[in-house]
Amino acid sequence: MGWTKRKYNRRIRSMAAVLLLFLCGCGSRAKEEQDGPRGDYVYTAEHQSLDGYCESISAVAFGSGEEVFLTGMKGGKEVLLSLKIGGNEAEEYPLEMGEGMRTIVIGRDTEGSLLLGMVGYKGTSLAERTVERVVIRKVTPEGETLETVDTGNIFSQKREDSFYISNILQDKEGNYYISATQDICVLHPDGSMYFEIPVDSYRLDLFALEDGRIVAGYDADNGWRLEEVDLQQKGFKPLESSIAFGRGIYRSGMDSDLLYTKDAVLYACNLADGEPTALLNWMDSDINSNNLKDFAVLPDGRIVALTVDYSRGASKEISILTGKKRSEVAEKTVLTYASLDFPFYVQEDIAAFNKQSEKYRIEIKDYGDDSMEYRDRAALLNADLTGSQPPDIIDISVLSLEELIAAGVAEDLTPWLEKDPETEREDFVENILKAYERDGKLYAIMPAFGIATLIGKTSDVGTGSAWSVDDMAALMEAKGKDCELLDASKADMLWLLCRINLEWFVDRENGTCNFTSGEFEKILEFADRFPREPEYGPDAPSEIEMIRSGRLLLVNGMITSVELYQVYEYEFGEAVNFIGYPVFGEESGTILAPQGTTVVMHAASANKEGVWEFIRFVLSEKRQENLKAVNGNGFPVLKSVLDRQLKEEMENEYYEDTDGTMKLRPKSSWGTGEYEVQVYAATKEQVERIWEMIGTARTYSRMDEQLFRIIYEEADACFSGQKSAEEAARLVQNRVQTYLNEIR
């Protein structure tokens, strides 16, 4: 749909050898595979929360020594706090702010002073406030103001909820460099505009090389780019290097040009190097690299990392990594985690589990790398599952549960759930458990879920809770050629309808299939009504314009929050029905979509108690409560948490306006670039409809690549007129049956 959520309230060189001694001993996984086992040194982490030092934190930055600086509200006033890394006491320096001003970013100049980027707003309405001015204040680490630079009207009139500053630097000549929203602004020392570089990237970073040059990193059409800011040309010039840099955090190096992160690894390199040196893997120190916001190297060689955990309400934490001999670190039982894909929530759950477990530690098991074809990596994983040393935990986000069961590697979790003293079956939404039950055995429990469904106006699809392919075809016929039923291609519809109805056609347990009873022919004939590829011209109307004008009838949606449910209602502009997908038989066409870390316990694991401890940890009330803090993370599966959160969605929120009156606050704002909708408290009817969908939704079997390839090859001949639907169905029947015989 394209909607995005906008939430309101928003070195010392002599020590380099010490650093490299520890770093080279630790190494990354990629280097381990080349050079053999890890060295004698590992990094252990101590974690220090920053959340208790003031009521709210607006900006954080590392100093040039062993301190971290943060700004935030304390006692109704904004303050600058200086905290020794690893210490408990913070020095507090009041900031004299103008009316409506607040600090949103902290940077540094070349001498170690702090640069506070302060923004002032005007307007009383929260949704209409605009930027009035931006001020740069230079202060010493002791809080003494050295100078204040007003940038005038450079940034004025920009909307508060669409304006942000992510970096502020100063070069040796005193010029300021600011990354503001999607632009880089270079200012003269007096705050006047020098020049501006439009970047058109929401992911924008600025950093200084060791020699003082300022470099920008940003997303471009051809991938991540690093370019030097050129004062003479007033633009970019290429940063010459043969290294394939990627999206990450970049900082000046010690004995190298720069340090940077890519994926979960910290690298050091000189631009003239052929390849970077992998220093450490953040996950080895229980740090989720997706939460990493900044890092620094202390004079004694320790590394500090700043993380923001959005699964805990943007909780901020400092992690201090210390190199130690492996013999000095308490041993834990290692649980291996197998997958081909590691989204942010998997890394977050693993890092959080490792921090709190005194007995177990989860390590991610690699199967090739991004340079390999996906099917080759999958082959490595599949071979490992039936090998002599299989992984303990299997992530099923990209694997078929049916295939794992058939291979005998999936453990029944029913006994583990029944004997657990803290968890009972009745604690969970019942049909969530049924999603991974087969023949009375429970193989997995999804910690969160979304609801996948087709959405249309009740005036078009009625108020029912299910429909068939015939019903969908009748709507398409009734509306005529001037209307588009769904934004999809022939292949899209074939995939969608076959996937939703796969169990109608394929019985994996018995190794049989049924594509010749007439239903599959209906799918072929219906899918053939769609274009080969939808056409999108430069002046094509937006989705919401198509819907409001009646030219687009259905949207394929995923409901992962009450707010998103409300946004879909707004998009259609009148009463809607989340009717589900067309199905054969009596089952619901509303689909449960697994969200979060969903795993299977390997039946041959030697550490099953540890695997269950991890599963229980992910399903714990504390972790379930965190789901609400992350937009799109899905609904929690614990009934008590789900019920509490849905009730909270019906509660109004208020804020105190500048004139002292209490006004209704929107819970969030969603936008597409052209349209914006503010979401307020949900109605009782909306929440009841969500409960209804949850109660009837079902899951579906995963359709593997080879199976769909067979189906599509014969369907494509039907689409091109080479074969009739009946002939194509008969050929699919024969080929799929042969395939099922081969894999049994």
Image (cartoon, rainbow, N blue to C red):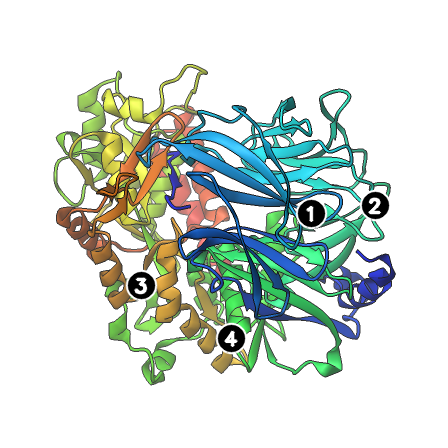
Crowd class of label 3 (few under 14; some 14 to 19; many from 20; radius 10 Å)? many
Q: Residue 395 location in percent, x, y?
A: 49, 62
Residue 487 horizontal side relative to residue 679, left or right: right
Q: Is residue 392 above or below residue 69?
A: below
Q: Quadrant of residue 549?
A: top left
Q: Which residue is mark 1?
A: 113
Mark 2 to mark 1 CA distance (whole Å) = 26 Å
Mark 4 to mark 3 CA distance (whole Å) = 22 Å
Q: As rendered, which of 518 and 563 lies closer to the eye?
A: 563
Q: Is residue 576 above or below residue 84?
A: above
Discs 4/3, front? 4
Q: Secondary structure at mark 4?
A: helix
Residue 302 circle label: none
Disc 2 vs disc 4: Cβ atoms closer than 8 Å?
no
Instruction: Pick whichever of labels 2 and 4 is earlier in the sequence.
Output: 2
Q: Secondary structure at mark 3?
A: loop
Please give the name of the residue rendered at 41% of the width and 35% of the height, measured from the top-left corner.
161
Instruction: Pick whichever of labels 4 and 3 is earlier in the sequence.
Output: 4
Q: Residue 347 location in percent, x, y?
A: 54, 60
Q: Which residue is mark 2?
A: 270
Crowd class of label 1 (few under 14; some 14 to 19; many from 20; radius 10 Å)? many
Q: Is residue 318 above or below residue 324?
A: above
Q: Secondary structure at mark 2?
A: loop
Q: Amino acid at mark 2?
A: Asn
Disc 3 vs disc 1: Cβ atoms closer than 8 Å?
no
Crowd class of label 2 (few under 14; some 14 to 19; many from 20; radius 10 Å)? some
The answer to whether residue 386 of the structure is visible from this angle is no
Instruction: Pick whichever of labels 3 and 1 is earlier in the sequence.
Output: 1
Q: Residue 328 location in percent, x, y?
A: 72, 82
Mark 2 to mark 4 CA distance (whole Å) = 38 Å
Mark 1 to mark 4 CA distance (whole Å) = 37 Å
Please give the name of the residue rendered at 75% of the width and 59% of the height, measured from the top-left corner.
279
